[in-house]
Image (cartoon, rainbow, N blue to C red):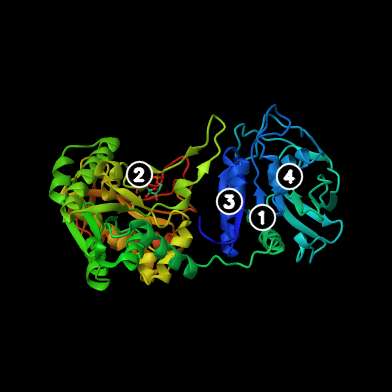
Amino acid sequence: MNTHQRLLVIDFGSQVTQLIARRLRELGVYCEIHPYQNVTPDFLTRFTPWAIILSGGPASVLDSDPPCPPKEVFSQNAPVLGICYGQQVMVQMLGGKVERGRRIGNGEISDPAIGDVFAGPSGSRVNSEFGRAYITSKGALPLLEGWFGEPTEQVWMSHGDHVAELPPGFEVFGVSSKAPFAVVADVRRGFYAVQFHPEVHHTPNGKRLLENFVRMAGFTGDWSMGAYRDEAINRIRREVGDSKVVCALSGGVDSAVAAKLVHEAIGDSVTCVFVDHGLLRKDEAEEVIGMFRDHFNIPLIHADESDLFLSELKGVTDPETKRKTIGRLFIDVFRRHAAAVGGAGFLAQGTLYPDVIESVSFSGEPSVTIKSHHNVGGLPERLGLKLVEPLRELFKDEVRALGREIGLPERFIGRHPFPGPGLAIRCPGEITRAKLEILRNADAVYIDQIRRHGLYGEIWQAFVVLLPVRTVGVMGDGRTYDYVCAIRAVTSVDGMTADSYPLSHEFLAETATRIVNEVSGINRVVHDITSKPPGTIEWE
Ligand code: XMP
């Protein structure tokens, strides 16, 4: 563990627990999320939290055997903040009473205004106070410093049960029209509990509440990217020793930051392997090689294997077969090139914190949610290599901040995500070199349009899909019979859900004209405006 002042978030399964961590990291506070099942008294001793937050969750403390933290969380000499379910569990464990709200089944509630972030197992809509509510002060409390500039504060409620009787030592500091115990605290012992979610944007002053909490706990905001960079470099040196390291460079931000950081730590003992499967965007390989090999002087193998990949993909139309074929070949190819490095003991990967957070699962034990398609799944075992993952503690926006800290160019850091199987999954049907060329050219025009109109930074992902459909058109005096392409632009926070970006009609018309005029092989452009769900971001 690192030496930062640390805050422990105990997760009871709320879909928004990660937001607590994000808000805290924004405040310069190092925190970790752990599922309640893993938080044992021993764990607490090892972790030595400066403060503890009990998250929300879909369960009810009135169920038989409800999720609970060990009672030792209340004897750590650290302030505790309970949020929503966390409030109820705190109240119940300390001798108060919780009553069941009128609701159907268990669960935090889904609300259309904020997507499905609160969807619990039942997902049913209920009465009580859900969604926007307004809190009135019932007495000064340091936790609420900076609140009540207006007589009431907007908050976001989302739980059916409610506190009915306070534990000894607790007082009420905030109420809403339907929640007489919206903010309660035992100030002497440093226990605070709120019925609403301070971590969501719909509680506009929520971050201030969290800030007050961590300042009261003594946090000085010692989590910064500069400090992280120095620590990460030292840690990589300790972990790796004199071994050689190989790093799979994909062209994405995560692997680029990981590679550059490892290079800063151990210099030329790291070799990057850039597998070029022939499914990259226009000029992408040249950009990556130019930056890493020529600009940063990092040893890099450019494995140009497009012939191999495209010949194996010949005739393949099923999306899953495409992915599997690409995944299998990638491992083979990487293995071959990594072996050529000779004597490597470690594989560096850009795994991020959201990929490794153990989530609370109500069907059984906590499960590690590794998005295997984002990583080089199975590689370390097959290569007999140990892993070094210098970004394991970071969220995506923190990786970008670290990228800036270590001098990656802004244009590279802000790049839209690009899937591992590349253009293969943007070319439904059979993949051919000719089609890929058309797709690359169209994509380049579209992205150029997005950049020219200043939209790139507002969009999570924008891309072209080449449809396996040809239509009749007319250009000049002639009839054309060419491909149709779809353009897509989405906003998203994490790729799990997405909305179509509202491109203006003028923009769309201009873009369609440019693509049809500048890209030979396309004579029609359509616009995909499907959200996720029910669609996915990619087409395959
Ligand atoms: P979907 O299409 O599942 O995509 O809505 C969600 C996000 O994940 C990316 N994606 C992938 N990334 N390997 C990757 O590295 C893959 O196989 C893959 N499939 C989808 C997608 O681009 C989007 O950002």
Q: Which mark is residue 51?
A: 1
Report, in whole angstroms, how far the alpha carbon at label 4 lies from the one at label 2: 37 Å
Q: Which mark is residue 373?
A: 2
Q: Which residue is at the front of the view, 498 or 230?
A: 230
Could you tell whether 19 is left or right of 412 in the image?
right
Residue 263 shows in this picture: yes
Residue 284 shows which numbered tag? none
**Which secondary structure, mark 4?**
helix
Q: Position of residue 493 (x, y in %)?
A: 50, 53
Please state which amino acid type lies under the numbered disc 3: Phe
Q: Residue at x 35, y 47 (%)?
A: 375
Q: Mark 4: give few (<14), some (14-19) or many (20+) Cα within 10 Å.
A: many
Q: Nearer the viewer, mark 1 or mark 4?
A: 1
Separation (CA) of disc 3 from disc 1: 11 Å
Check whether the beta carbons of the residues at disc 1 and disc 2 lie within 8 A of each other: no
The response on whether ligand 1 sits within 8 Å of label 2 is yes
SS under mark 1: strand
Q: Residue at x 75, y 60 (%)?
A: 143
Q: Residues within 10 Å of mark 1 (few under 14, many from 20)?
A: many
Front residue of 28 and 58: 28
Q: What residue would you read off at disc 4?
A: 87
